[in-house]
Image (cartoon, rainbow, N blue to C red):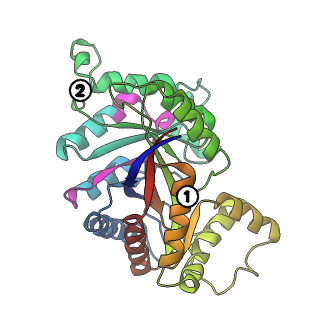
Amino acid sequence: MHINNQQSIPYSVLDLATVIEGKIPADSFKNSLDLAQQAERLGYRRFWLAEHHNMASVASSATAVLIGYIAGGTKTIRVGSGGIMLPNHAPLIVAEQFGTLESLYPGRIDLGLGRAPGTDQTTARAIRGENFNAANNFPQDVQTLQTLFSADNRNSKVRAIPGEGLDVPIWILGSSPDSAMLAAAMGLPYAFASHFAPAYFMQAIRLYRDNFKPSKHLSKPYVMACVNVVAAENDTDANRLSTSVLQLFKGIISGQRKLLQPPVDSMDNIWTLQEEAAARQMLTYSFIGGPEKIKKDLQRFADATGINEIMGTSHIYDHHARINSYRLFSEAMQIIKVPEASY
């Protein structure tokens, strides 16, 4: 590893328009916009929304619609998908939707693409219909999208209007070595879902960097990691706030999903030892604590990974506490440095 100099790391937001106990999706959308406006003020680079379906606590299912709402209520922050689950959609429709967004909010739209359904198999079948059993064409569909966005496609019989000739950055999202190899082969930026799938994180980003082929889109590898963040004025308060995300992951593991629950004093009577072990494994890359702990843990993470950008997601019950967490995360990230390196 050749070290040149120190550089600061951009920081971003992943939002799922989380629905909390006692509220409805309309409340979540208002909070998401407020969060995006605060994130813009705090220097966040991007605000991404994730496509999930049939999940009571996740209201970002109509992702492109929500991206338009957030972009329309902000001025400078990039807004995008983290991601669009491409097998759920025809590439032409995605190109038209994101071409429309880019036309409305030029220079501010990102298109992150995933190959998973973003839901359970029964719901995936309902979304995909007769295409449910079709072969996985994710790499070809990404290439089709690139073609549809290209100005060279203007003489084709199938064109994306709007979309054609627009610069909509495409990202490959993933949680496995397969996605890393695809991003590397296509010379595209890579965003890893380390906030819930940490097992292959280090292997995947190493494979991506080792196999990266420069393209007209990107000259050298660019890795963004998504992590969980729960920051507060002190470690005790942060740990209590974090019990909401612990309950959320307990629900994922047990198959008993609920709206985001308020924090509790103790998880002892809420989960089993097995559920705790599984949840803490999934939450390996979580930054929970007061300002000093957050800074130390983030610096350690940056040193170990040489990451290019960190995207934080925060499942915090109280909206004001969540805004405060993102403020503290922003302050920590402004101090964190990573060696500019060749991996």
Q: Is residue 322 above or below residue 40?
A: below
Query: What crowding class fits label 1: few (fewer than 14 Cα within 10 Å), some (14-19), or many (20 or more)?
Result: some
Q: Is residue 149 above or below residue 234?
A: above
Gap between marks 2 and 1 measured at Cα: 39 Å
Could you say whether the residue bearing mark 1 is in a helix, strand or loop? Answer: helix
Q: Which residues fall within the magenta stretch?
A: 72-94
Q: Is residue 327 visible?
A: yes
2 or 1: tag closer to the N-terminus: 2
Q: Which mark is residue 164?
A: 2
Q: Position of residue 147 (x, y in %)?
A: 33, 21
Could you say whether the residue bearing mark 2 is in a helix, strand or loop? Answer: loop
Q: Residue at x 62, y 35 (%)?
A: 177
The magenta stretch spans residue 17: no
Look at mark 1 in the image and give the residue it sits on. Answer: 301
Q: Is residue 193 visible?
A: no
Q: Which circle, 2 or 1, is nearer the viewer?
A: 1
